[in-house]
């Protein structure tokens, strides 16, 4: 493998900004136990001192599923607790079905064909969709006009109401939100677009209703942007999402490499893989990271050009690099990317 090229301090800072938060030891141990592993070592370590970090409660159903597929004894108290968590997720998934199924049918009648993003799209890669806790759904449309038509139809024909004046955020009477996105993901990740992903879409049967989801490589790119946004918080679901998406994405090396060489999105993907590789059993992520670094041009040189352009345009490169809060960072990254 080629030796890693030296990067400037500015690019290194951007790399840190676009990397997901690496879990601490307790979190990593729990997540590793919740994920299917070729051996039971991670589950044994967790059972030696069972506990659920406060930010990992949404992974309890996944942990229950993993433990049920081992021969390890589970204390009765934990068996009840995890079984209850699994039941809650199954009921949540059923409730989402009652929301999303009719919504997809309504959109099909309007001859609208969105891409399903968000939690339920990621759940398609899980052994069972109910193992992925989710409440948020996103639909990506080809144009703003299609999004507006979809919003009007859903609020007219189904128990949705707009959460804001734009009609981009809808709320179902059951309490579940639905986000309608037009054309591209929000800046600075507008490289991820309907036009790019639709030709490579994967059909997904949603209880008899056909829906399109991104292929695994595209889904991993979408997930990388979600992981960046989650860096300010402590949500760990993206780690499990990445774990289940990565084998499919690794089977599409050209598509994954194309995303990994994109400015901004590329750094987000590299950061996601580095964080995943740090988990016990994260060998596939490490292998894929090494392959991408060796076989494709890293995005750093292009990011250096973007930084220079940003410096000329706004005169204050440090504004971006020293921003403490993500809304400020995303604002300047957007300014930086759109001017290229």
Image: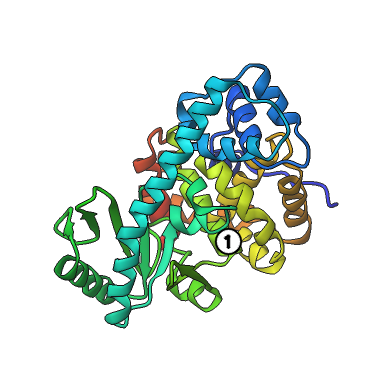
| Colour setup of the view | rainbow
Q: Position of residue 177 (x, y in %)?
A: 28, 52
Q: Quadrant of residue 104?
A: bottom left
Residue depicted at x 72% and y 41%: 37
- Of all residues shown, which one is farthest toward the top? 49
Residue depicted at x 52% and y 66%: 214
The foreground one among 142 and 86 is 86
- Of all residues shown, which one is farthest toward the right? 1
Q: In which quarter of the image is residue 169?
A: bottom left
Residue depicted at x 17% and y 58%: 162
Left or right: 312 with respect to 302?
A: left
Q: Position of residue 49 (x, y in %)?
A: 63, 16
Q: Is residue 250 above or below residue 204?
A: above
Count of marks overlaid on the render: 1
Q: Where is residue 237 in the image (x, y as percent from the top left)?
A: 50, 41
Q: Is residue 96 above or below residue 318?
A: below
Left or right: 301 with respect to 116?
A: right
Residue beneath disc 1: 262
Evaluate whether residue 320 shows in this view. no
Mark 1 packing: few (<14 Cα in 10 Å), some, or many (20+)? Answer: many
Residue depicted at x 48% and y 49%: 130
Q: Is residue 101 above or below residue 335?
A: below
Left or right: 8 with respect to 140?
A: right
Evaluate whether residue 172 shows in this view. yes
Q: Where is residue 64 in the image (x, y as percent from the top left)?
A: 57, 36
Assign a secondary structure to mark 1.
loop
């Amino acid at each position: 493998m080629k030796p890693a090229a030296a990067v400037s301090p500015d690019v290194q800072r951007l790399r840190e900004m676009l990397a997901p938060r690496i879990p601490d030891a307790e979190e990593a141990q729990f997540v590793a136990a919740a994920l299917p592993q070729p051996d039971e070592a991670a589950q044994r370590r967790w059972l030696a001192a069972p506990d659920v970090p406060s930010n990992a409660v949404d992974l309890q159903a996944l942990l229950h599923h993993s433990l049920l597929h081992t021969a390890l004894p589970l204390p009765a108290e934990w068996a009840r607790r995890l079984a209850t968590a699994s039941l809650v997720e199954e009921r949540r998934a059923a409730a989402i079905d009652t929301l999303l199924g009719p919504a997809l049918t309504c959109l099909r009648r309007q001859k609208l064909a969105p891409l399903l993003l968000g939690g339920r799209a990621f759940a398609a890669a899980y052994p069972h969709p109910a193992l992925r806790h989710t409440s948020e759904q996103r639909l990506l449309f080809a144009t703003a006009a299609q999004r507006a038509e979809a919003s009007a139809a859903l609020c007219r024909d189904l128990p949705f109401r707009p959460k804001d004046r734009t009609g981009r955020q809808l709320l179902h009477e059951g309490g579940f939100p639905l986000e309608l996105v037009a054309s591209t993901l929000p800046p600075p990740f507008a490289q991820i677009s309907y036009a790019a992903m639709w030709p490579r879409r994967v059909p997904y049967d949603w209880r008899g209703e056909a829906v399109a989801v991104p292929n695994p490589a595209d889904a991993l790119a979408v997930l990388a942007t979600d992981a960046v946004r989650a860096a300010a918080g402590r949500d760990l679901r993206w780690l499990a999402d990445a774990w289940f998406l990565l084998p499919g994405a690794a089977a599409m090396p050209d598509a994954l490499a194309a995303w990994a060489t994109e400015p901004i999105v590329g750094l987000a993907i590299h950061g996601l893989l580095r964080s995943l590789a740090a988990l016990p059993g994260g060998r596939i992520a490490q292998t894929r990271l090494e392959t991408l670094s060796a076989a494709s041009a890293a995005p750093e040189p292009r990011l250096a050009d973007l930084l220079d352009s940003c410096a000329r345009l706004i005169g204050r490169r440090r504004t971006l690099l020293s921003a403490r809060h993500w809304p400020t960072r995303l604002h300047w990254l957007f300014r930086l990317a759109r001017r290229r």
